Amino acid sequence: MKKIFGFTKKKRSSSSTPDNGSVLSVGYELKDKDLGKVHKAASVGDLTKLKQLAKKNDINQLDKENRTALHIACANGHVELVQFLVESKAKLDLCDNQNRSALMKAVQCQHERCVSILLENHANPNLVDINGNTALHLAANIPSVSTAVLLLQYDAEINSQNKEGFTPLMVAVREDHIEMADFLLKEACRVPVCAINPPRWPPCGRAGLLPDRPPTWTLHITHSQLVWLTHLLHHTHIPKPWGAGWWG
């Protein structure tokens, strides 16, 4: 199977920070010599310095990796800096060289307050990175149900598919994140997906499990994953007429 998150998976350990499809570090690797003054202030969380610099410098300037000060502040969880940058009209949806927005970095690095600030100020939750992953895909992979709740409150697409056709629910299944999969499955059943599913799929949350491909396409999952996913499917309320009969 192709790597859908662009990284090679490594064995999990308690000291690792989960990435959006791996267990590699999710924060930016920053070198002082590569950072301008604005980016450097954002990296160390120096609000006073950033306020001074903002008077004469463009807070939306990009570094060599197409990162803004907002990207770096979000990746490091500097809440006060994020709030200041947002209030200073920083562009929220600029993307770095992995096509990830500041919101996506805040999700990846698990800084939920930064996620909240960005969403409250209309950051787009449905941007996709170079692998087609949305912020909700990233939250599903961590997993962080509370972040997923936030994203869905601000209209994140629950059935969005990445370049491999994986939805956030399928990512949760692949990673054995049972609580996240349970949550996403129940949320998918609340969504009137008749508008987003192809005509051949019934308008039900379960249709969101599979992308717009022939019914023979399937997610490669282990037997244990299949057992508990089947359990979830049979114990989740599905609105009529697609509850009984369609699933077998």
Image (cartoon, rainbow, N blue to C red):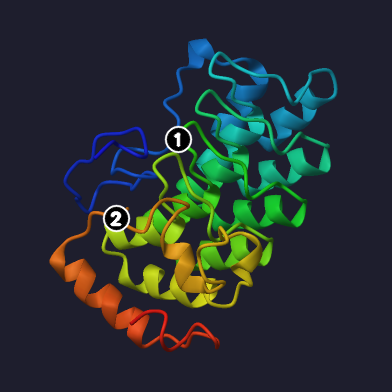
Q: Is residue 142 visible?
A: no
Amino acid type for the residue under numbered disc 2? Leu
Q: Callout 2: helix, strand or loop?
A: loop
Relative depth, front residue between 162 and 116: 162
Nearer to us: label 1 or label 2: 2
Compared across the picture, whether 229 is left or right of 20 comes to: left
Query: In the image as oriented, which residue stretches furthest toward the front?
Result: 200
| The label number, if any, that marks residue 131 in the structure image | 1
Q: Position of residue 197 (x, y in %)?
A: 56, 60
- For image coordinates 45% across by 18% down, the residue present is 31
Compared across the picture, whether 5 is left or right of 115 comes to: left
Q: Is residue 213 visible?
A: yes
How many residues crowd around disc 2 within 10 Å: few (fewer than 14), some, or many (20 or more)?
some
- For image coordinates 39% across by 42% down, the residue present is 164
How many residues crowd around disc 1 within 10 Å: few (fewer than 14), some, or many (20 or more)?
some
Residue 22's quadrant in the figure?
top left
Quadrant in the picture for the C terminus: bottom left
Residue 191's quadrant in the figure?
bottom right
- Where 239 falls versus 117 (above or below)? below
Q: Callout 1: helix, strand or loop?
A: loop
- For image coordinates 68% across by 41% down, the residue present is 81
Q: Earlier in the sequence, mark 1 or mark 2?
A: 1
Relative depth, front residue between 231 and 88: 231
Q: Which residue is mark 2?
A: 219
Compared across the picture, whether 190 is left or right of 30 comes to: right
Compared across the picture, whether 244 is left or right of 123 comes to: left
- Where 73 falls versus 13 (above or below)? above
Amino acid type for the residue under numbered disc 1? Asn
Q: CA distance from mark 1 to mark 2?
A: 17 Å
